Image: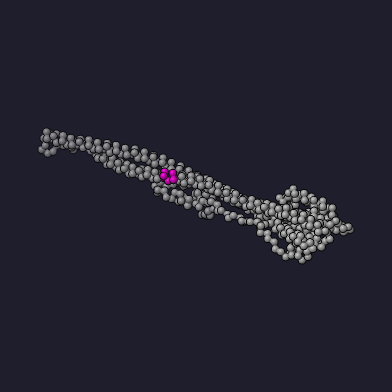
């Protein structure tokens, strides 16, 4: 039968329990008892000929208005149309027929049409609810994106902090280099000055005590006294100069030692800040990868649910539209018979076959599957040369970043090593 508008609507073997309500159960029960009384119920379906003629042995009572209503609510709409065709030529009284048509018309307006409209609303809501699954996927993806944006802001902050640290490291490197240059210069001066002191700080040999030709003792001693005094002055001067040069060299060496220690400590601090950057990037990559997998899984599940719901909804749509057309045919035939008790069959046939009935209001509005939003992916994999160049390529040449030692960088390098073709020697 044309089952979508029946008390328990069926479509191609599928029972639509959503269309079942207390009123329809009551009417369907009335159908069962009414059909059984006429001997026309077979497998839950009322057959008009058997209902009219019974078992073929005895003529059944005339079709009543209750029978027409039972046929209609049971979904036997073609049977109702056949009854209406036979009413045009029946011998029943006008009052009886008018009553039957009126009762049928009330059933159409108050039961059948509302059932179809309700069924359409249910199908539309069900389909919309499945479309909402895609919006839920997008909403979850948006929420995840907001979290990753917070993580990206952290990466930016850590990167800026690391960049500043490397710039300070660069200045310390320059200062240390300058200090080392001055220290080398001070050491060179010290070596030169002290070598001159060492040269004069010697005992005279015996030749210095030989008198000059014709020189008497007094003249000799006077001359040697002047020579020794001059030599002593030079020794004292050179000694003083060497001591000063040594002090300056030692002071410069101590200063440079402090700067070298400062530079070493600062390099360690900057390396720690770089590790913080690399770790935060690894965490961001893991979050993005997980979010992408969840989003794709959500989309797959939503698409499959939507596909099933869409097929079911369109089957319901076809049933509702078919039953709506049949109801409009019956309504047309009822109105024709009300206007002309003995209407010709041709007039009634126009209702059944010669008129087009609109089902626009029973057409589901399906927007289809929303477009797939691309997942977030890092353009430069952590640990790759591109990653190092993007984050650290602009750093001062005298304060470079170290190779990434975070887990995702190590994993990337291991994967690259495994993917590299083996070399044979």
When asked about the image quadrant of residue 237, the answer is top left
Question: Which quadrant of the figure contains the N terminus?
Answer: bottom right
Q: Is residue 360 above or below residue 205?
A: below
Query: Where residue 56 sits in the image (x, y, percent)?
Result: 87, 59
User: Going 74% across and 65% down the picture, which residue do you hit?
Assistant: 350
Residue 273: x and y, percent? 45, 43
Seen at 67% across and 52% down, the residue is: 121
Decide if residue 408 is in sight here. Answer: no
Q: Is residue 243 visible?
A: yes
Residue 62 placement (x, y as % from top left): 84, 57
Q: Is residue 423 left or right of residue 215?
A: right
Q: Position of residue 152 (x, y in %)?
A: 49, 47
Q: Residue at x 35, y 43 (%)?
A: 175
Residue nearest the observer in this picture, 112 or 222:
112
Residues 195 and 154: in front is 154
Magenta residues, dominant SS class: helix
Q: Is residue 193 left or right of residue 307?
A: left
Nearest the viewer among 358 and 199 is 358
Q: Which of 338 and 63 is in front in this view?
A: 338
Residue 230 in the magenta stretch? The answer is no
- As drawn, the residue found furthest toward the right would be 57
Q: In this view, does 256 lie to the left or right of 360?
A: left
Q: What stretch is highlighted in magenta?
A: 160-166
């Amino acid at each position: 039968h044309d089952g979508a508008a029946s008390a328990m609507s069926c479509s191609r073997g599928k029972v639509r329990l959503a269309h079942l309500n207390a009123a329809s159960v009551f009417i369907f029960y009335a159908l069962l008892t009414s059909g059984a009384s006429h001997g026309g119920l077979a497998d839950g379906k009322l057959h008009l000929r058997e209902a009219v003629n019974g078992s073929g042995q005895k003529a059944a009572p005339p079709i009543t208005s209750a029978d027409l209503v039972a046929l209609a609510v049971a979904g036997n709409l073609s049977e109702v149309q056949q009854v209406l065709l036979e009413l045009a030529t029946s011998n029943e009284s006008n009052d009886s027929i008018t009553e039957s048509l009126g009762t049928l018309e009330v059933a159409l307006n108050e039961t059948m049409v509302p059932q179809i409209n309700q069924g359409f609303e249910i199908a539309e809501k069900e389909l919309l609810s499945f479309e909402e699954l895609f919006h839920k996927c997008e909403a979850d993806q948006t929420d995840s994106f907001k979290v990753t944006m917070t993580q990206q802001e952290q990466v930016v902050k850590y990167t800026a902090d690391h960049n500043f640290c490397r710039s300070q490291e660069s200045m310390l490197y320059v200062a240390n280099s300058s200090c080392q240059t001055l220290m080398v210069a001070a050491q060179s001066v010290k070596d030169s000055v002290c070598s001159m002191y060492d040269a004069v700080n010697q005992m005279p040999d015996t030749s210095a005590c030989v008198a000059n030709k014709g020189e008497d003792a007094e003249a000799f001693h006077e001359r040697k006294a002047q020579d020794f005094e001059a030599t002593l002055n030079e020794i004292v001067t050179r000694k003083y100069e060497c001591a000063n040069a040594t002090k300056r060299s030692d002071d410069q060496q101590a200063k440079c030692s402090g700067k070298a220690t400062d530079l070493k400590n600062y390099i360690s601090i900057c390396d720690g800040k770089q590790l913080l950057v690399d770790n935060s990037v690894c965490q961001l990559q893991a979050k993005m990868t997980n979010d992408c997998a969840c989003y794709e899984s959500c989309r797959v599940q939503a698409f499959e649910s939507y596909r099933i719901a869409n097929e079911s909804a369109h089957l319901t749509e076809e049933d509702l539209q078919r039953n709506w057309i049949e109801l409009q045919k019956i309504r047309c035939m009822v109105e024709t018979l009300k206007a002309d008790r003995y209407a010709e069959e041709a007039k009634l046939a126009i209702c059944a076959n010669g008129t087009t009935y609109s089902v626009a209001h029973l057409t589901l509005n399906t927007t289809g599957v929303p477009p797939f939003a691309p997942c977030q992916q890092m353009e430069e994999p952590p640990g790759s040369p591109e990653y190092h160049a993007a984050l650290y390529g602009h750093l001062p040449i005298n304060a470079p970043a170290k190779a990434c030692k975070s887990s995702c960088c190590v994993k990337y390098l291991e994967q690259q090593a495994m993917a590299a073709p083996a070399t044979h020697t």
